[in-house]
Amino acid sequence: MDPKEKLILDLVAWIAAAPRPYAEVMEGWRTSCPRLPVWEDATDRGLLACEARDGGLFVVATTAGRAALSPAAPR
């Protein structure tokens, strides 16, 4: 598995556990290398999405993102 693929799945799993404020996601992945390509790939693939809720912007795992975490998902 490409190391970046593992980072993408790690990001999706972290967000799938609970929706996270956008700022928290960017702060939490600030030290991850390469952060932005991981974020961009995850959102481009439709694994994560941003939603307005409770007066803020939150990042959530999509149905496709949750499916990617399944043990049966192709790697």
Image (spheres, helix red, strand yellow):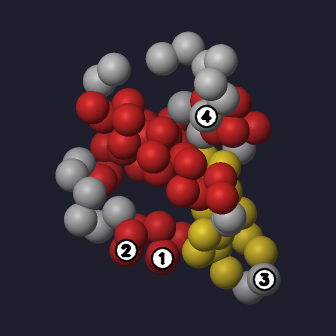
Badge 4: few (under 14), some or many (20 or more) residues near its Cα, within 10 Å? some
User: Mark 2 or mark 4, which has the lower sequence index?
Assistant: 2
Q: State the residue position of label 3.
A: 54
Task: Identify the amino acid type marked 2.
Answer: Glu
**How far separated are the C-alphas under marks 3 and 1?**
14 Å
Looking at the rendered structure, which numbered label has been put on residue 27? 2
Type of amino acid under label 1: Ala
**Could you say where residue 10 lies in the image, as x and y percent from the top left?**
45, 46
Are there few (<14), some (14-19), or many (20+) residues within 10 Å of tag 3? Answer: few
Can you see residue 25?
A: yes
The residue shown at (66%, 29%) is 70
Residue reaching furthest front?
A: 71
Task: Specify the farthest residue to the top.
Answer: 74
Q: Quadrant of residue 15?
A: bottom right
From this view, report whether residue 70 is shown above or below residue 75: below
Image location of residue 66, percent across then percent down = 69, 39
| Residue nearest the viewer, comparing 50 with 47 | 47
Mark 2 in CB contact with mark 1 (< 8 angstroms): yes
Cα separation between marks 2 and 1? 6 Å
Relative height, residue 60 to residue 6 (above, below): below
Left or right placement of residue 42 versus residue 31 in this view: right
Spatial separation of the CA atoms under disc 3 and disc 2: 20 Å
- Mark-to-mark CA distance, 2 and 4: 23 Å
The disc placed on residue 69 is 4
Query: Which is closer to the viewer, label 3 or label 2?
Result: 2
Q: Kindly report the distance in space between the C-alpha atoms of the residues bearing marks 4 and 3.
A: 27 Å
Q: Which sits earlier in the primary sequence, circle 3 or circle 2?
A: 2
Q: Secondary structure at mark 3?
A: loop
Q: CA distance from mark 4 to mark 1?
A: 23 Å
